[in-house]
Amino acid sequence: MPESVRGGRSIPPVQRNEQGNPPPRVALLVPVKAFADAKQRLRGELDAAQRTALARWCAERVIAAAGAFAVHVVCDDPEVAAWAEHLGVTVIRCDVAGLNPAVERGLQVLADTGFDLAVIAHGDLPLAEGFSELALDGAITVVPDYRYDGTNALVLPTALAGRFSPHYGSGSFRKHLIEALAHWPLVRVLRVEGLAHDLDTPADLADPRMEEVRQWLQTNPASPR
Protein backbone atom coordinates (compact mmCIF):
# COMPACT_ATOMS: atom_id res chain seq x y z
CA MET A 1 0.00 0.00 0.00
CA PRO A 2 1.41 3.45 -0.85
CA GLU A 3 2.78 5.50 2.01
CA SER A 4 0.18 8.18 1.27
CA VAL A 5 -2.63 5.81 2.23
CA ARG A 6 -2.57 4.75 5.87
CA GLY A 7 -4.78 3.15 8.50
CA GLY A 8 -8.50 2.53 8.28
CA ARG A 9 -10.81 -0.40 7.89
CA SER A 10 -10.11 -3.20 5.44
CA ILE A 11 -12.51 -3.89 2.58
CA PRO A 12 -15.21 -6.29 3.86
CA PRO A 13 -15.56 -9.80 2.42
CA VAL A 14 -17.47 -10.06 -0.83
CA GLN A 15 -21.09 -11.19 -0.59
CA ARG A 16 -23.27 -11.93 -3.60
CA ASN A 17 -26.76 -10.75 -4.38
CA GLU A 18 -29.66 -12.81 -5.71
CA GLN A 19 -28.33 -12.56 -9.27
CA GLY A 20 -24.99 -13.96 -8.19
CA ASN A 21 -23.12 -10.70 -8.69
CA PRO A 22 -21.10 -9.17 -5.87
CA PRO A 23 -22.57 -5.91 -4.56
CA PRO A 24 -20.55 -2.80 -5.28
CA ARG A 25 -17.81 -1.95 -2.83
CA VAL A 26 -18.56 1.53 -1.59
CA ALA A 27 -16.35 4.00 0.24
CA LEU A 28 -17.20 7.33 1.84
CA LEU A 29 -14.63 9.91 0.75
CA VAL A 30 -14.46 13.02 2.94
CA PRO A 31 -12.14 15.85 1.89
CA VAL A 32 -11.08 17.76 5.01
CA LYS A 33 -9.08 20.98 4.98
CA ALA A 34 -6.88 22.09 7.86
CA PHE A 35 -9.17 22.71 10.82
CA ALA A 36 -7.40 25.98 11.65
CA ASP A 37 -8.22 27.29 8.17
CA ALA A 38 -11.86 26.21 8.17
CA LYS A 39 -14.99 28.28 8.81
CA GLN A 40 -13.35 31.61 8.01
CA ARG A 41 -16.70 33.13 7.05
CA LEU A 42 -17.79 32.67 10.66
CA ARG A 43 -15.05 34.95 12.01
CA GLY A 44 -17.62 37.52 13.13
CA GLU A 45 -19.47 34.95 15.25
CA LEU A 46 -16.76 32.57 16.46
CA ASP A 47 -13.16 32.95 17.55
CA ALA A 48 -10.34 30.83 16.11
CA ALA A 49 -10.58 28.10 18.76
CA GLN A 50 -14.33 27.80 18.29
CA ARG A 51 -14.02 27.62 14.51
CA THR A 52 -11.39 24.90 14.77
CA ALA A 53 -13.47 22.89 17.22
CA LEU A 54 -16.59 23.31 15.09
CA ALA A 55 -14.86 22.14 11.92
CA ARG A 56 -13.56 19.04 13.70
CA TRP A 57 -16.94 18.26 15.27
CA CYS A 58 -18.80 18.60 11.95
CA ALA A 59 -16.35 16.26 10.24
CA GLU A 60 -16.76 13.72 13.03
CA ARG A 61 -20.53 13.86 12.54
CA VAL A 62 -20.13 13.07 8.85
CA ILE A 63 -17.82 10.15 9.59
CA ALA A 64 -20.21 8.83 12.25
CA ALA A 65 -22.96 8.75 9.60
CA ALA A 66 -20.94 6.50 7.28
CA GLY A 67 -22.64 3.30 8.41
CA ALA A 68 -21.05 0.26 6.76
CA PHE A 69 -19.10 2.29 4.21
CA ALA A 70 -15.33 2.33 4.60
CA VAL A 71 -14.33 5.92 5.39
CA HIS A 72 -11.42 7.63 3.66
CA VAL A 73 -10.35 11.14 4.62
CA VAL A 74 -8.33 12.98 1.98
CA CYS A 75 -6.27 15.89 3.26
CA ASP A 76 -3.04 17.85 2.94
CA ASP A 77 -2.67 18.68 6.63
CA PRO A 78 -0.70 16.59 9.18
CA GLU A 79 -3.06 17.49 12.04
CA VAL A 80 -6.09 16.34 10.06
CA ALA A 81 -4.27 13.15 9.10
CA ALA A 82 -3.45 12.39 12.74
CA TRP A 83 -7.04 13.11 13.78
CA ALA A 84 -8.43 10.78 11.11
CA GLU A 85 -6.02 7.99 12.02
CA HIS A 86 -7.06 8.35 15.65
CA LEU A 87 -10.65 7.74 14.53
CA GLY A 88 -9.54 4.59 12.72
CA VAL A 89 -10.30 5.72 9.18
CA THR A 90 -8.07 5.55 6.14
CA VAL A 91 -6.02 8.65 5.33
CA ILE A 92 -5.25 9.64 1.75
CA ARG A 93 -2.63 12.36 1.53
CA CYS A 94 -2.92 14.91 -1.26
CA ASP A 95 0.04 17.21 -1.76
CA VAL A 96 -1.89 19.64 -3.97
CA ALA A 97 -4.06 22.13 -2.10
CA GLY A 98 -7.70 22.55 -3.02
CA LEU A 99 -10.93 20.59 -2.94
CA ASN A 100 -10.96 19.52 -6.58
CA PRO A 101 -7.43 18.02 -6.57
CA ALA A 102 -8.25 16.28 -3.28
CA VAL A 103 -11.34 14.63 -4.78
CA GLU A 104 -9.43 13.59 -7.90
CA ARG A 105 -6.69 12.06 -5.77
CA GLY A 106 -9.16 10.29 -3.49
CA LEU A 107 -11.17 8.85 -6.37
CA GLN A 108 -8.01 7.48 -7.99
CA VAL A 109 -6.88 5.82 -4.77
CA LEU A 110 -10.29 4.23 -4.27
CA ALA A 111 -10.20 2.90 -7.83
CA ASP A 112 -6.71 1.50 -7.28
CA THR A 113 -7.71 -0.23 -4.03
CA GLY A 114 -10.74 -2.10 -5.33
CA PHE A 115 -13.74 0.08 -4.56
CA ASP A 116 -16.52 0.44 -7.13
CA LEU A 117 -18.35 3.53 -5.89
CA ALA A 118 -17.21 6.64 -4.05
CA VAL A 119 -19.68 8.64 -1.97
CA ILE A 120 -17.99 12.03 -1.75
CA ALA A 121 -19.32 14.19 1.07
CA HIS A 122 -18.25 17.50 2.51
CA GLY A 123 -16.97 17.48 6.06
CA ASP A 124 -19.29 20.31 7.16
CA LEU A 125 -22.67 18.57 7.07
CA PRO A 126 -23.67 18.49 10.76
CA LEU A 127 -27.18 17.22 9.97
CA ALA A 128 -25.96 14.15 8.08
CA GLU A 129 -27.67 10.95 9.22
CA GLY A 130 -26.55 8.44 6.60
CA PHE A 131 -25.47 7.86 3.04
CA SER A 132 -26.72 4.38 2.19
CA GLU A 133 -29.64 5.66 0.09
CA LEU A 134 -27.18 7.37 -2.24
CA ALA A 135 -25.41 4.23 -3.45
CA LEU A 136 -28.19 1.84 -4.40
CA ASP A 137 -26.88 1.16 -7.90
CA GLY A 138 -24.10 2.23 -10.21
CA ALA A 139 -25.55 5.65 -11.01
CA ILE A 140 -23.85 8.97 -10.63
CA THR A 141 -25.87 10.73 -7.94
CA VAL A 142 -25.64 14.47 -7.40
CA VAL A 143 -26.93 15.76 -4.05
CA PRO A 144 -27.37 19.56 -4.12
CA ASP A 145 -27.42 22.02 -1.28
CA TYR A 146 -30.77 23.58 -0.45
CA ARG A 147 -30.12 26.44 -2.89
CA TYR A 148 -29.45 24.01 -5.76
CA ASP A 149 -26.13 25.80 -6.25
CA GLY A 150 -23.48 23.71 -4.52
CA THR A 151 -22.88 19.96 -4.38
CA ASN A 152 -22.94 18.58 -0.84
CA ALA A 153 -22.56 14.92 -1.83
CA LEU A 154 -21.62 13.21 -5.07
CA VAL A 155 -21.62 9.49 -5.87
CA LEU A 156 -19.19 8.47 -8.60
CA PRO A 157 -18.23 5.10 -10.05
CA THR A 158 -14.49 4.79 -9.50
CA ALA A 159 -14.20 3.70 -13.14
CA LEU A 160 -14.38 7.44 -13.87
CA ALA A 161 -11.14 8.17 -12.00
CA GLY A 162 -8.97 10.31 -14.24
CA ARG A 163 -11.91 11.16 -16.52
CA PHE A 164 -14.48 12.92 -14.35
CA SER A 165 -13.40 16.47 -13.48
CA PRO A 166 -14.84 17.77 -10.19
CA HIS A 167 -16.09 21.35 -10.25
CA TYR A 168 -16.47 22.30 -6.59
CA GLY A 169 -17.04 25.98 -6.05
CA SER A 170 -19.79 28.38 -7.09
CA GLY A 171 -22.41 26.73 -9.28
CA SER A 172 -20.98 23.25 -8.80
CA PHE A 173 -24.37 21.51 -8.84
CA ARG A 174 -25.07 22.47 -12.44
CA LYS A 175 -21.47 21.88 -13.49
CA HIS A 176 -21.39 18.42 -11.93
CA LEU A 177 -24.66 17.53 -13.60
CA ILE A 178 -23.30 18.51 -17.01
CA GLU A 179 -20.06 16.61 -16.36
CA ALA A 180 -21.98 13.53 -15.22
CA LEU A 181 -24.23 13.46 -18.28
CA ALA A 182 -21.16 13.63 -20.51
CA HIS A 183 -19.61 10.54 -18.93
CA TRP A 184 -22.25 8.12 -17.63
CA PRO A 185 -25.55 6.66 -18.85
CA LEU A 186 -27.35 6.74 -15.50
CA VAL A 187 -27.43 10.06 -13.64
CA ARG A 188 -29.83 11.24 -10.96
CA VAL A 189 -30.37 14.20 -8.69
CA LEU A 190 -31.36 13.37 -5.14
CA ARG A 191 -32.32 15.97 -2.57
CA VAL A 192 -31.65 14.76 0.96
CA GLU A 193 -32.74 17.06 3.79
CA GLY A 194 -29.95 16.02 6.14
CA LEU A 195 -27.34 16.68 3.45
CA ALA A 196 -28.82 19.86 2.01
CA HIS A 197 -27.51 22.17 4.73
CA ASP A 198 -23.81 22.76 5.12
CA LEU A 199 -22.35 25.19 7.63
CA ASP A 200 -20.35 28.02 6.10
CA THR A 201 -21.94 31.38 6.81
CA PRO A 202 -23.57 33.27 9.69
CA ALA A 203 -26.93 32.67 7.99
CA ASP A 204 -26.25 28.92 8.00
CA LEU A 205 -25.43 29.03 11.71
CA ALA A 206 -28.61 31.01 12.46
CA ASP A 207 -30.82 28.56 10.54
CA PRO A 208 -33.39 26.95 12.89
CA ARG A 209 -32.19 23.53 11.72
CA MET A 210 -28.80 24.25 13.31
CA GLU A 211 -30.16 24.48 16.87
CA GLU A 212 -28.14 21.44 17.94
CA VAL A 213 -24.99 23.06 16.57
CA ARG A 214 -25.63 26.27 18.51
CA GLN A 215 -26.26 24.30 21.69
CA TRP A 216 -23.04 22.37 21.17
CA LEU A 217 -21.11 25.60 20.72
CA GLN A 218 -22.28 26.73 24.16
CA THR A 219 -21.00 23.59 25.84
CA ASN A 220 -17.78 22.69 24.02
CA PRO A 221 -14.48 23.48 25.78
CA ALA A 222 -13.44 26.06 23.17
CA SER A 223 -16.39 28.32 23.96
CA PRO A 224 -15.95 31.12 26.49
CA ARG A 225 -17.67 30.60 29.83
Image: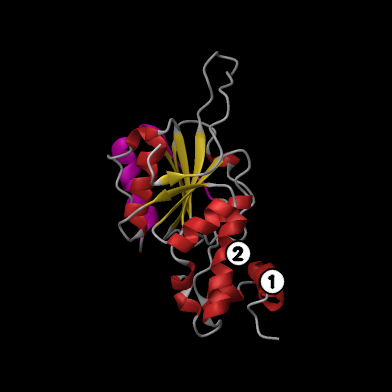
- The image shows residue 196 at horizontal and vertical percentages of 54, 58
- The image shows residue 44 at horizontal and vertical percentages of 51, 85
Seen in the picture, residue 137 relative to 218 is either above or below; the reply is above
Contact between marks 1 and 2 (CB within 8 A): the answer is yes
Question: Which residue position holds label 2?
Answer: 57
Labelled disc at residue 190: none
Placement of the C terminus among the 4 image quadrants: bottom right
> Does the segment drawn in magenta span residue 178?
yes
Seen in the picture, residue 159 relative to 46 is either above or below; the reply is above
Alpha carbon separation for disc pair 1 and 2: 9 Å
The first of marks 1 and 2 along the sequence is 2
Outermost residue on the top side: it is 20
Q: Amino acid at mark 1?
A: Trp
Q: Quadrant of residue 224?
A: bottom right
Seen in the picture, residue 85 relative to 138 is either above or below; the reply is below
Q: Quadrant of residue 8?
A: top right
Whether residue 184 is visible here, answered yes or no, is no
Which residues fall within the magenta stretch? 170-191
Question: Which residue position holds label 1?
Answer: 216
- The image shows residue 24 at horizontal and vertical percentages of 50, 28
Q: Relative to the observer, which residue lies in front, 213 or 1?
A: 1
Secondary element at image label 1: helix
Q: Amino acid at mark 2?
A: Trp
